[in-house]
Image (spheres, grey):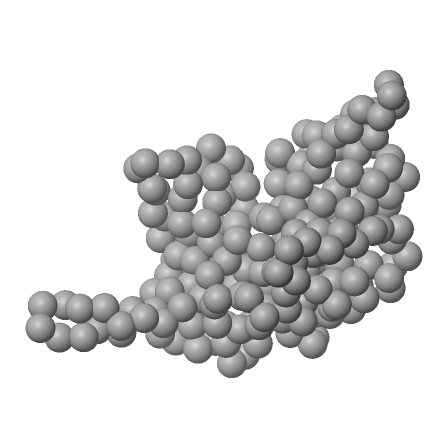
């Protein structure tokens, strides 16, 4: 995978389960600036954790830390280095958290093959593949929920560019849910976009 393709997947991952922040924290009597680039995942999905950690280390050129949350099945893959946060914001072009009303795909990664790879990272982290029974007919559906932001329209444009058939469900407070239904569209998704998340790959096997 070329460097730009790895960055595109990183962008999708960050749009999904990523967080970019700068905070003031107290260290005794002093205020300390705390910086964070992190991705939060299900700690039981070991193979995908390793995949995301590798992508982040190759894109950011630094070793990532793993922080397990003791009270839940969750893990943060993170770095707190100032120069890495600057790179993500100023060179890659991602936005600071929170994502509400501000989440945006950097222009370079909004179309063509790189756009598809962004979709892959987003689907693998924040999307789901559900199986439905409609009067005995079993069919799959890909769903991706998005907060109100410029990314909603950008993702629609990528899907339109490659001729995906999909529906948009309008949710409360400006949120949307993208639905891509049926075996044919699922096959097209895995042919063009794919997945690195073993949970999605395993669910898809019966239809591909």
Residue sitting at x 65%, y 46%: 127
* Position of residue 131 measured from the top left corner of the image (x, y, whole percent): 74, 29
Residue sitting at x 71%, y 45%: 143
Q: Quadrant of residue 159?
A: bottom right
Position above or below: 110 against 75: below
Q: Can residue 177 be seen by looking at this rendering?
A: yes
Viewer-proximal residue among 159 and 65: 159
Position above or below: 16 against 186: below
* Position of residue 26 measured from the top left corner of the image (x, y, whole percent): 17, 68
* Position of residue 182 measured from the top left corner of the image (x, y, whole percent): 86, 37
Left/right placement of residue 36 relative to residue 15 reads: left
Position above or below: 179 against 8: above
Left/right placement of residue 62 relative to residue 187 reads: left
* Position of residue 190 measured from the top left corner of the image (x, y, whole percent): 79, 43
Image quadrant occupied by the N terminus: bottom right
Q: How many marks?
A: 0
**Which residue occupies the extreme top position in the image?**
136
**Which residue occupies the extreme left position in the image?**
29
Residue sitting at x 54%, y 46%: 51
Left/right placement of residue 15 relative to residue 117 reads: left
Viewer-proximal residue among 36 and 84: 36
**Which residue occupies the extreme bottom position in the image?**
90
Left/right placement of residue 113 relative to residue 53 reads: right
Image quadrant occupied by the C terminus: top right
Q: Can residue 6 be seen by looking at this rendering?
A: no
Residue sitting at x 46%, y 49%: 40
């Amino acid at each position: 995978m070329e460097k730009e393709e790895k960055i595109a997947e990183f962008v999708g991952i960050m749009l999904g389960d990523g967080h970019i922040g700068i905070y003031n924290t107290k260290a005794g009597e002093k205020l300390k600036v705390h910086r964070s680039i992190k991705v939060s995942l299900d700690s039981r999905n070991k193979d995908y954790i390793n995949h995301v950690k590798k992508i982040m280390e190759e894109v950011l050129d630094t070793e990532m830390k793993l922080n397990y949350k003791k009270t839940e099945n969750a893990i943060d893959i993170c770095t707190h280095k100032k120069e890495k946060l600057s790179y993500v914001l100023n060179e890659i072009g991602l936005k600071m958290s929170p994502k509400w009303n501000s989440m945006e795909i950097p222009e370079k990664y909004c179309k063509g093959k790189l756009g598809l790879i962004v979709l892959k990272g987003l689907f693998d982290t924040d999307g789901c593949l559900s199986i439905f029974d409609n009067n005995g007919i079993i069919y799959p559906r890909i769903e991706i929920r998005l907060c109100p932001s410029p990314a909603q329209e950008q993702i629609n444009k990528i899907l339109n560019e490659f001729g995906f058939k999909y529906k948009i469900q309008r949710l409360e407070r400006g949120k949307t849910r993208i639905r891509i239904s049926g075996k044919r569209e699922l096959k097209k998704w895995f042919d063009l976009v794919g997945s690195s998340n073993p949970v999605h790959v395993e669910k898809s096997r019966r239809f591909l």
